[in-house]
Image: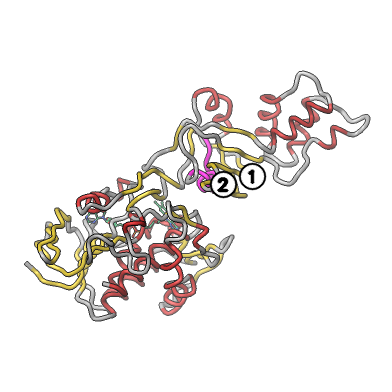
Amino acid sequence: MQEVDVVVLGAGAAGLMCAIEAGRRGRRVVLLDHAERVGKKILISGGGRCNFTNIHCRAENFLSENPHFAKSALARFTPADIIALVEKHGIRYHEKTLGQLFCDRSAMDVVTMLERECAEAGVRVLTGARVASVKRDGKFVVETSAGELRAEAVVVATGGLSIPKMGATGFGYDVARQFGLRVVECRPALVPLVFGGEDAARWCDLTGLSAEVVAAAGVKRRRGSFREKMLVTHRGLSGPAILQVSSYWRAGEVVEIDLAPGVEVFAPLLARNARRDAGAAVMALRTILPGRLAERWVALHEPAGWTNASLEAMEREVHAWRVMPAGTEGYAKAEVTAGGVDTAELDAKKMESRKVPGLYFIGEVVDVTGWLGGYNFQWAWASGVSAGRAV
Ligand code: FAD
């Protein structure tokens, strides 16, 4: 049995950052992962360029049963801090859109940066090490395929359920439950939505068409609205606007889509002597939407008569297209997992369990889920640093 100060379970963004911070403080840290290398999700993130932060990051950009919980960690390690680290390693980056920072070259740069920092901080990294169990016997005893470890503190950074083929497991939730911590029900988030039978037949042959829309989903305090691109897929809808609202959506609810934000599409048809028929309506809508999408929308919403009232009704509908998804593409396609270890169980400054001193949870395994656009990595860095300073 090996005795150390801290064992970090999971060498993703959060675990790596936590191990670095604790190692810099002189703690003896073992960071282990069952994958054959560290930071696998970082490598595939942001289309291979890793959207490593968002310069506009605030607690409002996250979903959680407690929307205030993330504030403390986010204030401890800000986008400016990760930018400083990236710059220290000479990594070039750019802002793509909406404050999203991506590597110019490759996500590999971020992983290499974290590996170097781990080495400098004296972190022992064990890859290919499966964790069998975590027990407490005065200290924590972590049984792994690479032997037993004994430590004062265990940090659970095993991520969520998204992309199981990349090694995602529910291990972190199991550890939480084993120690009596509540877990908020998990669900796929930042995930494409799937149409049911009739809608699939109506829209899915338009796969590949996209438009800038305002999509909204959810109710009352849990409502999100985003002006971004929407994409028709062979099974439903995707694109940033839809991925964003998917995190707010629940089964049985509608998604409302403004297909022509800020534009009075059918106003020209209301003019005196204007042509009023399906062709004219399509012409008007084509100025906003791709032609085939405009044609399909008009064909499915054509009124019985082209009166002022029916044109006004069409106008309202084009700004509030109500879609009832049959479901999502699930964890196989979800960028993140919403829900997770209940924040009420954790100290917001340290990320330590209130019930079990020495047991910490960070990153995606916690019930804090960011919007699309670099927010999830910022949460991973920030919660990792908070725990790393406390362990
Ligand atoms: P993870 O990165 O998932 O790390 C968890 C680690 O734990 C993994 O290495 C896993 O192998 C290990 N593990 C799991 N179970 C066990 C076990 N039982 N024993 C040992 N090890 C275990 N977010 C952004 O902010 N920007 C982006 O550009 C972005 N792009 C993304 C693209 C894709 C395709 C996906 C799927 C996600 C993307 N995300 C992005 C989300 C982001 O990757 C995650 O939010 C982030 O990686 C979470 O970090 P984490 O350390 O909590 O978990």
Helix, strand or loop status at disc 2 = helix
What residue does disc 2 label?
A: 241
- Amino acid type, mark 1: Val
- Amino acid type, mark 2: Ala
What residue does disc 1 label?
A: 213
Q: Which residues are magenta?
A: 236-246
Between 125 and 19, the one nearer to me in the picture: 19
Magenta stretch prevailing secondary structure: helix
User: In the orientation shown, which residue stands out farthest toward the top?
Assistant: 304
At x 54%, y 45%, the residue is 239
Helix, strand or loop status at disc 1 = strand
Point out residue 124 in the picture as x, y percentages from the top left corner: 20, 71
* Image side of residue 240 versus residue 315, left or right: left
Label 1 packing within 10 angstroms: few (<14), some (14-19), many (20+):
many
Q: Which mark is residue 200?
A: none
Point out residue 2 in the picture as x, y percentages from the top left corner: 9, 69
Between 223 and 166, the one nearer to me in the picture: 223
Query: Contact (CB < 8 A) between labels 1 and 2?
Result: yes
Which quarter of the rendering shows the N terminus? Answer: bottom left
Q: Is residue 245 magenta?
A: yes
